[in-house]
Image: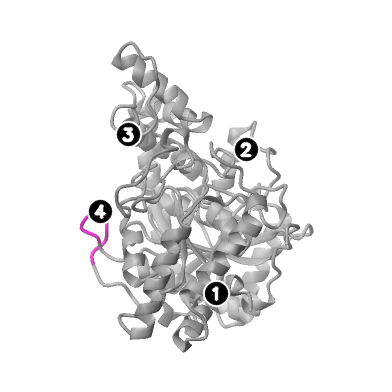
Amino acid sequence: MELHALRAHQLRELLDKGEISSVELTKSLLARIEAVDPAIGAYLSVREKEALQEAEAADRRIREGRDVGPLTGIPVSVKDNISVDGSPTTCASKMLEHYISPYDATVVARLKAQGAPILGKLNLDEFAMGSSTETSALKLTRNPWDLERVPGGSSGGPAAAVAADTAVLALGSDTGGSIRQPAAFCGIVGLKPTYGRVSRYGLVAFASSLDQIGPMTKDVRDAALLLAAIAGHDPLDSTSIPGEVPDFAAELDKGVDGLVIGLPKEFFGEGIAPEVKDAVLAAVRVLEGLGAKVQEVSLPHARYALAAYHMIAPAEASSNLGRFDGVRFGHRAKEAEDVVTLFEKTRQEGFGLEVKRRIMLGTFALSAGYYDQYYLKALKVRTLIRQDFEKAFQQCDVLATPTAPTVAFRIGEKWENPLEMYQSDLLTAPANLAGIPAISIPCGLNGEGLPIGLQLLGPALGEGLLLRVAAAYEGATGGVESRPKPRLEVE
């Protein structure tokens, strides 16, 4: 039995029955990482010693029957912009290449409290700025379905690790699609929760009003279990939403009979690859066959979402990344004759091209004389987009769209054209601007055998509804067992 290939809810049963141990499972994953990751490049660091110690503690807890939760003993891997005490948190940047976090992010603390070993830290676009993981200053990550293609971004490391079975569960972050787009490219499940549903404490900030941590898993049930483990109010995050965490897993078997699924016409137009559109519409027909009703809706301001996103996100990034100045922590330039030169040289050496591009764009958007013309106007557009979604959800329960306009593209294909790269977020950024939850699930392959993602969007705090619809589709199409898997040449 290949333990690394199983899902978390399957492993839970084996652990509870005593048929396997957490140490055995963790060793299986470590061996898988050693065998496969040199070709994939998903991990920036592996916590072998610490993870095995945490697995031993989990095994004792299971034997004693003491506070065993759904994820006790099941390793989780974490995107490397989420802090883990005593481990590197590099953000895939030279700026933080040697930084060791002195504390746990709230999501990590909650996983550790449940007894989930933290296996390692995963690659990303530098400071989560990118759509292909090519902006990482530390490593190139490849798509397990085709090693010459990107895994998506910015959570390309988590997506590739889950797809390659080097992680059972992973945490990513999503600012404009950074969980969902790589999930679609790698054929896995990726969920961006409602803004504030999951604490951002310990997440290195990119754009504070857009960032959200979420699960990246092999199936929908695992996503429900992982979301339940990390969600909930956190007094350390002022944007965290108060209230009890629902039992997301209890929603999975309710079906879709009577639900209304909206198809936003703006999400199926120009720029969407025909094979992607056809696969998504076929998935919607499956849901219709299960009793859902389908109707066309309109989100008239969605066409402006990408432009608004690329004003708001860089503006917030230019503020958030001001802390990296060579004085307090991170990279420090040598031989600077004064403080101003120290700042300039540190940021010149420490930041990559894409990060510099976004800082400059954001600083310009916030500058005197341009604030009203660009940033304030983008905020007004954001309000209109949120209102469009509110009106749409008065007509339907969930929305269904493609996750990304295309399947995974080749490494280097869009590197020279940033505007073309930014189009990868065309269908995902609106959910971040509106603060609503969205999930990407696999819905087939294109003619070249590459995964296609179906995106489902719901009203604020509607994660249970999204998981319910996603589970219905997954069940109707045979689930993970019937889905093709990447054939790794390294195996």
Q: Quadrant of residue 481?
A: bottom right
Density class for disc 2 (Cα within 10 Å; few <14, some 14-19, many ≥20) is few
The mark nearer the N terminus, 1 or 4, is: 1
Task: Nearest to the eye among marks 1 and 3: give it.
Answer: 3
For the residues marked 1 and 4, what is the alpha-carbon distance in whole angstroms? 31 Å
Density class for disc 1 (Cα within 10 Å; few <14, some 14-19, many ≥20) is many
Q: Main secondary structure of the magenta part?
A: loop
| Amino acid found under the numbered disc labelled 3 | Phe
Contact between labelled residues 4 and 1, with CB atoms less than 8 Å apart: no
| Amino acid found under the numbered disc labelled 4 | Asp
Task: Nearest to the eye among marks 1 and 4: give it.
Answer: 1
Task: Nearest to the eye among marks 2 and 1: give it.
Answer: 1
For the residues marked 3 and 4, what is the alpha-carbon distance in whole angstroms? 22 Å
The mark nearer the N terminus, 1 or 3, is: 1
- Say which mark, if any, is on residue 7: 1
The mark nearer the N terminus, 2 or 1, is: 1
- Say which mark, if any, is on residue 420: 2
Q: Position of residue 465 (x, y in %)?
A: 44, 73
* Residue 239 belongs to the span the image colors magenta: yes
For the residues marked 1 and 3, what is the alpha-carbon distance in whole angstroms? 38 Å
The mark nearer the N terminus, 4 or 2, is: 4
* Residue 286 belongs to the span the image colors magenta: no
Quadrant where the N terminus sits is bottom right
Q: Which residues are magenta?
A: 234-242
Q: What's the residue at 34%, 27% (across, down)?
A: 326
Quadrant where the C terminus sits is bottom right
| Amino acid found under the numbered disc labelled 1 | Arg
Contact between labelled residues 1 and 2, with CB atoms less than 8 Å apart: no
Q: What's the residue at 48%, 78% (across, down)?
A: 21
Residue matched to label 3? 329
The mark nearer the N terminus, 3 or 4, is: 4
